[in-house]
Image (cartoon, rainbow, N blue to C red):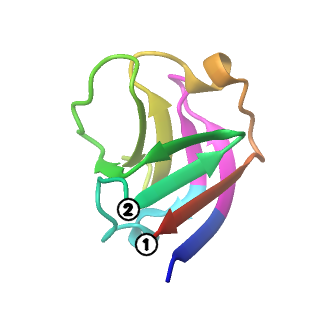
Amino acid sequence: MANTIEGSVEKIGESGNLITDIAIEHVADLPADDSVTIKFGGHETAGIHSADHGQPMGTLVASRGSSGFLEIEIVGISVAEMLGIKAGESVIVTSS
């Protein structure tokens, strides 16, 4: 049975990352693999990584951000500009 956490993009960070209203405590135990999906604005990524994930440039990543909330970024690129995502966009985390 899948578990779902629903939230939204609370604000856009300085580097164009999406900062959600989903506190990292709610996703602390979720793995960085494809058993977890994060959907937002018609896009999807898998797994929730640590803030210092070290993923390669151009990778779409969800992480337990230094903000204390789930963050979504494209490494080295403004995800907000690249994908046209704005504050208020729905974010759905599903884990199996």
Left or right of 91: which side holds 65? left
| Residue in view at x 48 percent, y 16 percent | 77
Q: Kindly report the distance in space between the C-alpha atoms of the residues bearing marks 2 and 1.
A: 6 Å
| First along the sequence among labels 2 and 1 | 2
| Residue in view at x 42 percent, y 48 percent | 46
State the extent of the magenta-drawn residues as a range: 7-20
Q: Secondary structure at mark 1?
A: loop
Q: Magenta: predominant secondary structure element?
A: strand
Percent of width and height locating residue 21: 61, 58
- Residue 61, by quadrant, is top left
Q: Secondary structure at mark 2?
A: loop
Left or right of 76: which side holds 21? right
Percent of width and height locating residue 76: 40, 16
Residue 86: image tag: none
| Residue in view at x 30 percent, y 71 percent | 29
Residue farthest to the bottom, as pictured = 1
Which amino acid type is shown beneath numbered disc 2?
Ser
Tell me the crowding category of disc 1: few under 14, some 14 to 19, or many 20 or more residues within 10 angstroms, Cα based.
few
Percent of width and height locating residue 91: 65, 54
Report the residue marked by disc 2.
35
Dot 2 and dot 1 residues touching (CB under 8 Å): yes
Report the residue marked by disc 1.
96
Left or right of 4: which side holds 83? right
22 or 48, which is in the foreground? Answer: 48
Q: Quadrant of the C terminus?
A: bottom left
Which amino acid type is shown beneath numbered disc 1?
Ser
| Residue in view at x 40 percent, y 71 percent | 25
